[in-house]
Amino acid sequence: MASSSSSGLTFKLHPLVIVNISDHCTRVKSQMNPPVTSAANTTSNNTNGAGDGVVTAVSAAIPPPRVYGCVIGVQRGRTVEIFNSFELLYDPIAHSLDRAFLEKKQELYKKVFPHFYILGWYSTGSDAEESDMHIHKGLMDINESPVYVLLNPSINPAQKDPPVNIYESELHVIDGIPQLIFVSSSYTIETVEAERISVDHVAHLKPSDGGSAATQLAAHLTGMHSAIKMLNNRVRVLHHYLVAMQKGEFACENSLLRQVSSLLRRLPAIESEKFQDDFLMEYNDTLLITYLAMFTNCSSTMNELVDKFNTAYDRHSRRGGRTAFM
């Protein structure tokens, strides 16, 4: 496999594709785990305390299952934008994907998204394998130059970039024989407003144990505090660097100074009259909405109290009236 692609294509990957592949892998993995867990628990009961090591060993010995599917999107000139994906079954004997389901799915997507085309396929694993080329060649009758999106499900705490690689196929001459090989391509994460809202919603999902609103507010404030703290640290590092540059401890970098100057020019806009008026108006509107909610809650509580009092008083009157009549 070559190090990098020479096609000159620009790839844009949407978060929905990463979420779909991750969800597909998680579901398949969770379906395969129960038999392993059951066997490991039986072993742990027979070994009197040595079960934890057996469970760990069994889990480590079984590699994560590979999943397969297709990626769809659009290509405008030299820019390839991958919008969505769907799952496919894999035939390990023929080393191919389910073509009947693929063609049916393609027809359905054409009715809803007429501009979307099948751009390639996806799978999971740490690196592209030799058998992947058979699947890749099988899709060349649909797309003459399909892309291969590979997601690595292994957890690496030291990795900061998304565990996703995009490969193209190029024809190289190896030992005098022309062969198709996978070459890695760079990509950028592209999002639209709907995806940003969805990702934010997933990040702020209510806990499954029925956490209260106070718990969610505490988690939100903790995230805000962490973001502000990180911003403060970055500004402090930048300030120390500029002071050291002014003292002559570091060489003067004009490109960095231009970026800092551009950043500082945004600050006076925050102190303008228009900003203060808009801020105060939004702040007052927020306070009014808060007070209105408090009044509404208070009125509701008062109405409930009056209803309960009327009900209790009405019962007391009836009971007293029957006693006097008797």
Image (tube, helix red, strand yellow):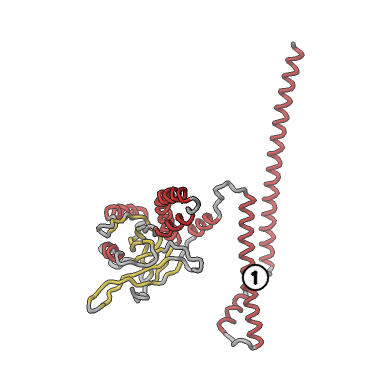
Locate residue 230: give its quadrant: bottom right
What's the residue at 63%, 52% (across, down)? 215
In this view, the residue in front, 306 or 214, is 214
Locate residue 251: give its quadrant: bottom right
Residue 293 position in % (x across, y down):
67, 46
Residue 41 position in % (x across, y down):
45, 49
Q: How many marks?
A: 1
Locate residue 15: give its quadrant: bottom left
Where does the N terminus fall, quadrant-wise?
A: bottom left
Q: Is residue 315 above or below residue 97?
A: above
> Tag 1: residue type?
Asn
Where does the C terminus fall, quadrant-wise?
A: top right
Q: Provide the secondary structure element on which disc 1 rests.
A: helix
Residue 195 position in % (x across, y down):
48, 58
What's the residue at 42%, 67% (across, down)? 12
Residue 86 position in % (x across, y down):
37, 56
Q: Is residue 123 visible?
A: yes
In this view, the residue in front, 255 or 236, is 236
Instruction: Tell me the residue that label 1 is attached to.
Output: 232
Instruction: Tell which residue pokes out farthest to the top in this image.
Output: 326
What's the residue at 31%, 64% (across, down)? 132
Q: Is residue 213 above or below residue 116?
A: above
Q: Is residue 179 left or right of residue 224?
A: left
How many residues crowd around disc 1 within 10 Å: few (fewer than 14), some, or many (20 or more)?
Answer: few
